[in-house]
Image (spheres, rainbow, N blue to C red):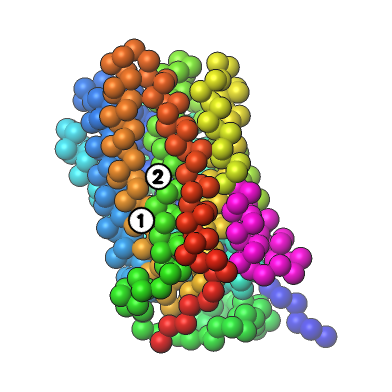
């Protein structure tokens, strides 16, 4: 009788899910406190854009190096280093007394948070066969959405009860609680005593990649010399900044356009980010479903991603939305489609590259996304300040929504150009 396949790999996904939830909870706090901090520190939209840019710049640098660090020290230690760093940085916001102080705290947060996705994607590659990776990625990546759902409820409550400093301190401290569970329950499959033989064999059932331990990480020059790296690079460069725009400016958009009070829990934002949870899990499921139908992996991933790219296009109609809930619906669809796209684009890294290079490739792509996150806030801040001075800040948001609508289709076309069939990269 065949031994029953265990489910310990889903315990790992649960740990990754909560880490990502905390990651985005800490990242989202400043967007919800933006009106309060603007009054306290006399920020303009451009000032706020610079604070966001400091996070993005540090995140870009951190991703490039953290991916390589994780390939060297492993996933367990990688997460330990990352979450301690970003939790301390999140708490440090409470002690900032100037715009520069916030910029320094945001930069430290960016460096620490840059370890989350390279470590999580490598963990999925270590713990799942290809046919389950997109779904597993979608599940843990939905933590980004849960963090963004919890934040609009939790942060205004803390703000009202104690103040903005305590909002940073309380949310930042949560990471240390998660760290206890990670230390106890996580280890790579070959060292995990709770893992059964049948599940171990199932995890390593992909026949195109040998199982190896203690492999030397691949040099960057090798990765930049292959087209697949550039496909992932441009896919992240063009789409990650859109999600950061949704995180850091949506609260302000609803506040300025529809007079939402951000000092109270926001149902509208909670609905938007709840929709993204459905998109993340559903997006990962869809490409896995195509694979189970017998489709080649590249066709399944690309078809799913093209569908999600088209789902972002209707956000351009938000400029005509005079009703709050119509705007919520259009933005919810776009944000959900982004997370569905994200679940699949992350998985393309483990589809195209051997496990020993996955964290490095994810770091390179994440760096590209963060570079876009440096440039896009400059445009956002200047555009919104210009239209605010003209008395019509909503028009500035409408231009930004048009950019959002086209970004994913452009990214899909470029990715197809560089990696039409997402061929597996052979590295020495």
x and y percentages locating residue 176 in the rendered image: 38, 54
Q: Secondary structure at mark 2?
A: helix
Q: Residue at x 25, y 44 (%)?
A: 54
State yes or no: residue 65 in magenta.
no
Asked if residue 220 is positioned above or below residue 64 in the image, the reply reads below
**How many C-alpha atoms fall within 10 Å of the one at disc 1: few (<14), some, or many (≥20)?**
many
**Residue 168 falls in image quadrant:** top left
Q: What range is drawn magenta here?
A: 283-308
**How many C-alpha atoms fall within 10 Å of the one at disc 2: few (<14), some, or many (≥20)?**
many
Instruction: Look at the image and tell me in which quarter the N terminus lies.
Output: bottom right
Residue 30 visible from this viewpoint: yes
Asked if residue 413 is positioned above or below residue 324 in the image, the reply reads below
x and y percentages locating residue 36 in the rendered image: 31, 23
Residue 262 falls left or right of residue 210:
left
> Which residue was labeled with disc 1?
368
x and y percentages locating residue 328 in the rendered image: 57, 27
Residue 210 falls left or right of residue 135:
left
Q: CA distance from mark 2 to mark 1?
A: 10 Å
Residue 325's label in the rendered image is none
Prevailing secondary structure class for the magenta stretch in the rendered image: helix
Q: Depth check: 363 or 417 in front?
A: 417
Q: Secondary structure at mark 1?
A: helix
Q: Earlier in the sequence, mark 2 or mark 1?
A: 2
x and y percentages locating residue 111 in the rendered image: 29, 55
Q: Depth check: 89 or 329 in front?
A: 329
For the view shown, which residue lies furthest in the top direction? 391
Residue 8 falls left or right of residue 390:
right
Instruction: Look at the image and tell me in which quarter the C terminus lies.
Output: bottom left
Q: Depth check: 96 or 133 in front?
A: 133
For the view shown, which residue lies furthest in the front direction? 417
Residue 241's label in the rendered image is 2
């Amino acid at each position: 009788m065949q031994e029953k396949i265990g489910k310990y790999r889903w315990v790992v996904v649960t740990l990754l899910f909560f880490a990502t939830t905390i990651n985005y909870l800490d990242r989202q706090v400043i967007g919800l406190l933006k009106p309060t901090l603007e009054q306290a520190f006399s920020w303009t939209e451009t000032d706020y854009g610079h604070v966001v840019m400091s996070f993005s710049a540090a995140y870009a640098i951190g991703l490039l190096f953290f991916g390589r660090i994780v390939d060297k020290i492993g996933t367990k230690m990688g997460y330990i280093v990352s979450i301690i760093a970003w939790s301390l940085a999140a708490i440090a916001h409470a002690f900032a007394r100037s715009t520069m102080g916030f910029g320094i705290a945001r930069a430290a947060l960016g460096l620490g948070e840059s370890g989350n996705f390279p470590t999580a994607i490598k963990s999925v590659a270590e713990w799942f066969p290809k046919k389950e990776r997109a779904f597993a990625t979608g599940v843990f990546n939905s933590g980004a959405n849960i963090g963004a759902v919890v934040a609009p409820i939790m942060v205004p409550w803390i703000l009202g009860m104690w103040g903005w400093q305590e909002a940073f301190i309380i949310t930042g401290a949560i990471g240390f609680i998660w760290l206890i569970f990670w230390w106890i329950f996580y280890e790579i499959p070959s060292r995990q005593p709770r893992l059964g033989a049948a599940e171990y064999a199932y995890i390593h059932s992909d026949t195109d990649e040998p199982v190896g331990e203690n492999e030397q990480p691949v040099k960057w020059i090798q990765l930049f010399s292959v087209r697949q790296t550039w496909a992932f690079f441009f896919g992240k460069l063009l789409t990650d900044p859109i999600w950061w725009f949704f995180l850091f400016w949506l609260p302000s958009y609803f506040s300025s356009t529809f007079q939402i009070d951000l000092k109270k829990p926001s149902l509208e934002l909670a609905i938007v980010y709840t929709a993204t949870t459905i998109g993340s899990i559903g997006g990962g499921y869809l490409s896995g479903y195509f694979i189970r139908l017998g489709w080649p992996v590249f066709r399944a991933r690309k078809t799913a991603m093209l569908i999600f790219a088209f789902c972002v296009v209707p956000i351009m109609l938000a400029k005509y939305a005079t009703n709050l809930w119509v705007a919520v619906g259009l933005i919810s669809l776009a944000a959900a489609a982004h997370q569905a796209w994200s679940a699949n684009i992350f998985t393309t890294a483990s589809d195209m590259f051997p496990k020993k290079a996955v964290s490095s490739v994810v770091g390179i792509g994440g760096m590209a996304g963060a570079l876009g996150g440096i440039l896009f806030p400059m445009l956002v801040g200047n555009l919104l300040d210009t239209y605010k001075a003209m008395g019509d800040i909503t028009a500035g948001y409408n231009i930004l929504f048009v950019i959002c609508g086209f970004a994913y289709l452009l990214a899909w076309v470029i990715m197809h150009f560089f990696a039409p069939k997402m061929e597996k990269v052979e590295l020495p």
